[in-house]
C-alpha cells in the first residue's frame, strides 16, 4: 500500500488537528468521505488516525435524519398551534364573562 501522508485530509490533520475530504477510491471503486485527526503527541512522530465512510452511506444517514427532523418540526408546529389556540380561547372567554 502506498504512503498516505500526502493526502489532503492527512495534511490538514497535521496542520490544524483534523481534516476531511471527499474523493473516489480507486482501490474499492467508490466515492468515500475521509476524516483524519491528529492524536496528542507523545514525544515521537505525530500520529494521525484516518477514517473512511462510503459517501452513499453518509447520504442515507443524512436523508433519514432530515426525514426525522421534518417530522419532529411538523409535530412541534401542530403542538404549539394547538396550545396557542387553547390559550387564545381561554383569554377570549375570560374577556366575555
Image: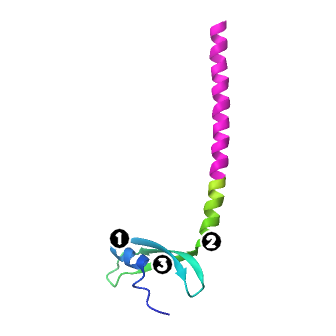
| Distance CA(mark 1)–CA(mark 3) | 14 Å
Q: Determine the residue positioned at 35% across, 70% down.
A: 16
Q: Nearer the viewer, residue 44 or 71?
A: 71
Circle 1: element type: helix
Up the image or down, 49 lies above or below 87; here it is below
Circle 3: element type: strand
| Distance CA(mark 1)–CA(mark 2) | 27 Å
| Residue 19: in magenta span | no
State which mark lies toward you, 2 or 3: 2
| Residue 78: in magenta span | yes
Q: Residue 50, labelled with which disc?
A: 3
Q: Give the magenta-colored segment's residue range.
A: 68-97
Q: Residue furthest top?
A: 97
Q: Determine the residue positioned at 54% across, 80% down.
A: 24
| Distance CA(mark 2)–CA(mark 3) | 19 Å
**Reading the chain from its start, which is encountered first: label 1 or label 3?**
1
Dominant SS in magenta: helix
Q: Residue 56, labelled with which disc?
A: 2
Q: Nearer the viewer, residue 12 or 56?
A: 56
Quadrant holding the C terminus: top right
- Do the numbered discs 2 and 3 sit on residues whose CB atoms are within 8 Å? no
Q: Residue furthest bottom?
A: 1
Image-quadrant location for residue 48 = bottom left
State which mark lies toward you, 1 or 2: 2
Circle 2: element type: helix
Up the image or down, 71 lies above or below 56; here it is above
| Residue 2 locus on image (x, y percent) | 46, 92
| Residue receiving disc 1 | 16
Amino acid at each position: 500500500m502506498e504512503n498516505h501522508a500526502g493526502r489532503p485530509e492527512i495534511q490538514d490533520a497535521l496542520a490544524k488537528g483534523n481534516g476531511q475530504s471527499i474523493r473516489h477510491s480507486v482501490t474499492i471503486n467508490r466515492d468515500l468521505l475521509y476524516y483524519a485527526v491528529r492524536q496528542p503527541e507523545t514525544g515521537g512522530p505525530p500520529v494521525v488516525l484516518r477514517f473512511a465512510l462510503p459517501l452513499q452511506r453518509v447520504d442515507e444517514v443524512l436523508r433519514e435524519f432530515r426525514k426525522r427532523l421534518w417530522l419532529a418540526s411538523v409535530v412541534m408546529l401542530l403542538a404549539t398551534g394547538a396550545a396557542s389556540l387553547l390559550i387564545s380561547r381561554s383569554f377570549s372567554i375570560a374577556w366575555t364573562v
